[in-house]
Amino acid sequence: MGEVVIGDDDGIARAVALLAAGELVCFPTETVYGVGGNAADPLAVSRIFQAKGRPPSHPLIVHIADARDLAAWAGDIPPSALLLAELFWPGPLTMVLRRGPAVPLEVTGGQDTVAVRVPAHPLALRLLREFGGAVAAPSANRFGRVSPTRAEHVADELGDAVALILDGGPASVGLESTIVDLSEGEARLLRPGGIPRQALIEALGGEVADAGARAPRSPGRLASHYAPASPVEVLGPSEFTVRLAGAEEVSVMARRERRHGFVGEWVRLPDDPDGYARHLYASLRTLDRPGRPIIVEAPPRDARWEAVNDRLDRAASTQREGREGG
Ligand code: TXA
Ligand code: MG
């Protein structure tokens, strides 16, 4: 079970056959790896929830090969959705739209909206094209854990729960797609991600507000989603310095070089938001040791860092509120 294979002709052919048979296949996207099943097959979709240990009320993203397939999955598609598809697909943008009649309720968690995206990873696109249908896929981690950005992370998370893992190398974006809700007219940001909010604002020519309390259910928005087992603390410069000098053994994630004299694990991340995002989840995995806190030097609180700060805040909120999402 869970054999890791490269995405050559043979690997793709095996993955396509498994999807057609209602089995699960893990595959790379440019954001994170997904665990996929035939979106038109309710039984395959229910297997995804089992594999992840995710409550069935939490909806999945439908992955399609081409924006032209959108009409098969969504209804009442607004012009803004077609514009965003034109500009950002294939790419790290998920749109929430009115559910089309053919979408199984298992995919949408019973809601009347559906989340759709065209991923940019060449292997994902080839898989979708050769499968000829849509693939429902959440991130390929167990519920509540950090999303996988490499095939070996997927094997650690779901190796015994899936038939096949396609290896497409390290994910280039490194955190999940941006989710924008267009189902109620005005665009609402449900989750910051690979496409910056500012790019959506420029494309749509108006503000893109956060989703209010009436927003559709989106477990990515639960405070304690994306958490490693280690407690995570995101600290500003002076707190960071004080914490390093303390007696407790800690690991560090920072944008600067290892402090002279610090003996624990220290991961240095790039100083730009894209580079930081690319390495964030893999670094949290590397430093994840039960009981040993991960001290994160807080990145700047500006718009370019919105998605990174969102994931760091969620990882850090575990200590305050207890584990929840997935
Ligand atoms: O980058 C990504 O989006 C990755 C790759 C594999 O495509 N997928 C991903 O899926 O992050 P997942 O299930 O881990 O997160 C998708 C989020 C969930 O929080 C889910 O609740 C939300 O999308 N979602 C799905 N359908 C929705 C809907 N109809 N309305 C609101 N939120 C929805
Ligand atoms: Mg996820």
Image (cartoon, rainbow, N blue to C red):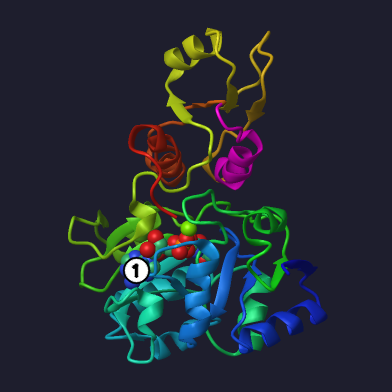
Which one is in front, 260 or 167? 167
Residue 258 in the image, given as x and y percentages of width and height:
66, 19
Residue at image location 65% in from the left, 69% down from the top: 27
| Total number of numbered discs in the rendering | 1
Please, is residue 225 above or below residue 218 in the view?
above
Q: Residue at x 58, y 45 (%)?
A: 281
Q: Residue 322: x, y in percent?
A: 37, 39
| Horizontal side, residue 225 vs residue 44: left or right | left
Within 10 Å of disc 1 (Cα), the crowding (few <14, some 14-19, many 20+) is some
On the image, the x and y values in percent for residue 21 come to 63, 88
Residue 282 on the magenta segment: yes
Magenta part of the chain: 275-291
User: Is residue 12 one of those drawn in magenta?
Assistant: no
Taking depth in this image into account, of 228 and 62 the one nearest to the observer is 228
Observer-nearest of 284 and 299: 284
In the image, what residue occupies the spot 19% across and 55% down? 212
Provide the secondary structure element on which disc 1 rests.
loop
Establish if 4 lies above or below 42. above
- Quarter of the image where the N terminus is located: bottom right
The residue labelled by disc 1 is 57
- On screen, residue 153 versus residue 193, left or right, reads right
Q: Main secondary structure of the magenta part?
A: helix
Residue 146 seen anywhere in this rendered image of the structure:
yes
Q: Residue 186: which quarter of the image? A: bottom left
Q: Quadrant of residue 18?
A: bottom right
Mark 1 is on which residue type? Answer: Ser
